Image (tube, rainbow, N blue to C red):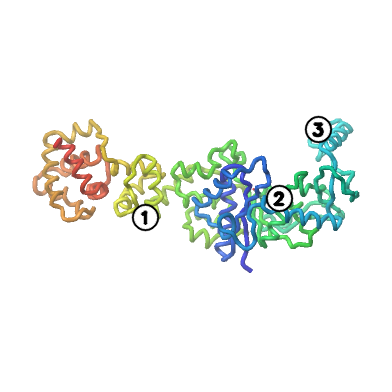
Amino acid sequence: MKPRVRFAPSPTGYLHIGGARTALWNWLYARRLGGTFVLRIEDTDQERSTPESVQAILDGLTWLGIDWDEGPGKGGPFPPYFQMEKIKRYHEIADQLIAAGKAYRDYTTEEETAKMRLDFAASKGLTEKDDLRKAGFKYSSPWRENTDKLDRPFVIRFKLQPKGEKIGFEDLVHGRLEKPDEDLDDFVLLRTDGIPLYNFGCVIDDHDMEISHVGRGQEHINSTYSQIAVYQALGWTPPVFTHFPLIMGQNGEKLSKRKHPEADVMAHKRAGILPHALLNFVARLGWSHGNDELFTREQMVAFFDLKDVGKTNGVWNPEKLLSINAHWLKTLPPAEVAAAVLPYLEHVGVTDAKVDARLELAVKAFGPRAKTLVDMAASIKPYYANAVTMDPAAAAKHLDAPGKEMLKLAKAKLLAMPEWTSAALEPIVDQLALETGAKKGAIAQPIRVAATGGTTSPGIGDTLAMLGRDETMRRIDAALGT
Ligand code: GLU
């Protein structure tokens, strides 16, 4: 059986790095085994869910190249893929559970619940702010055994029937996880407004969507016990669970949206990280394949297995991310990097660049030096922008009278050049050196300063090829003052 896995984000903000890793690992697992990767939007938290966040999640996944087989914009055999469009189905299942005596309508008001907690706290000499659960408080509804239907607001609660046994599951990473069934309480399935809570909606959807493997963060382990109870009550087979380790920030705290700007996937896009580099880095946060640090997309797909996920938390390491990024900037096919750098060039005002031999040449020339696409765009910009920013010191030194004489000779040679490629252009410095007896530096530097405004650039062939014939001539003329 081919696995069916899912990523089920709540759209309450941008795509978080932890979410991206969950999506990636599930996606890799599906892709390796020819399975299906489902995207489901768990938008039942109506106060916090927004359409902008849905879009941010879709954009983040799309930028990363994590494509979903079923879900928003794609459809699929088990719609809808937004929980808020599925309310009727949740009610249907809740009614089934009530009819079977496995759930009940609880008319207890919030004030009454608060009073129960207060009374309990007072009886123990505690306040309501203390951890009452730990002190033995267990909510017990007066409506548990009452099947009356009243015209009053109610929540629907799961009716736990502890047998004094353990409730648990086999986790692919943690092995058997279990706890006494008495430790669970009658959790809410549907709120007063009829909207399901996570533990209910999630089970129904994972079942309806025929999800075979659920991989998610370990902060959900406690929820999984409650979910197992729902599966049992409905007579459904639970999927295989894997709980992923946490991702810690550099300060040793869990990477959180509030405290760590790097938790935002799109912050890395803005900083000029290649999506592939971010995936490569994130894949390794809690998973390893020997000591390998660098993976192509194909290698990640070939090597990843849920059962190899570790228990040790991953730690954010910005230097490592940058070095992985630098590696892929110089290693990925130039056309791919050229396409990736285009928006960054546009951002710095270069509007005439496109993915062509010229830009690929620039990518090859600057790839080995750049750490980010932002750096790379800054290095490439002078080769596209119409006006050169001339460094006055460089001009004074290299565009003096002898420099300009040399530049005129170079111009004549360049005008006669039959083809404008790095290979054809590179030898002109040597040829002029032979013809004039001048030192190579005295030839190359005036050309370089005229062409780029400064004294450092790749080889003359690459430099002029990147500029193109017309722009080179314009800049040489400008430097010559003609
Ligand atoms: N909506 C839940 C979350 O974003 C999904 C957890 C799960 O994968 O079951 O945390």
Q: Vertically, is 192 above or below 6?
A: above
Determine the CA span between mark 3 and mark 2: 26 Å
Q: Secondary structure at mark 3?
A: loop
Mark 3, residues whose alpha carbon is within 10 Å: few (<14), some, or many (≥20)? some
Label 1 belongs to which residue? 335
Q: Label 2, secondary structure: give it.
A: helix
SS assignment at label 1: helix
Residue wearing tag 3: 128
Quote the CA–CA distance across marks 1 and 2. 44 Å
Give the position of the N terminus as an image quadrant: bottom right
Query: Label 3, label 1: how many angstroms apart (C-alpha)?
Result: 62 Å
Residue topped by disc 2? 221
Is 211 rendered above or below residue 380?
below
Q: Residues within 10 Å of mark 1 (few under 14, many from 20)?
A: some
Q: Residue 327, position in %: x, y?
A: 42, 50
Residue 301 appears in the rendering: yes
Is residue 311 visible in the rendered image? The answer is no
Q: Residue at x 55, y 43 (%)?
A: 316
Three-letter code, disc 2: Ile
Q: Which residue lies at the image location 52% right of the left edge and 63% below the top edge?
A: 302
Where is residue 24 drawn, in percent x and y? 56, 54
Amino acid marked by disc 1: Ala
The numbered mark, 3 or 2, whose residue comes first in the sequence reads: 3
Mark 1 or mark 2: which is in front? 1
Give the quadrant of residue 240.
bottom right
Q: Earlier in the sequence, mark 1 or mark 2?
A: 2
User: Few, some or many C-alpha atoms within 10 Å of disc 2 (few <14, some 14-19, many ≥20)?
Assistant: some
Q: Inspect the image, locate mark 3, and give the three-letter code of the amino acid beneath it.
A: Glu
Mark 3 or mark 1: which comes first in sequence?
A: 3
Name the side, left or right, on which 203 lies relative to 458: right
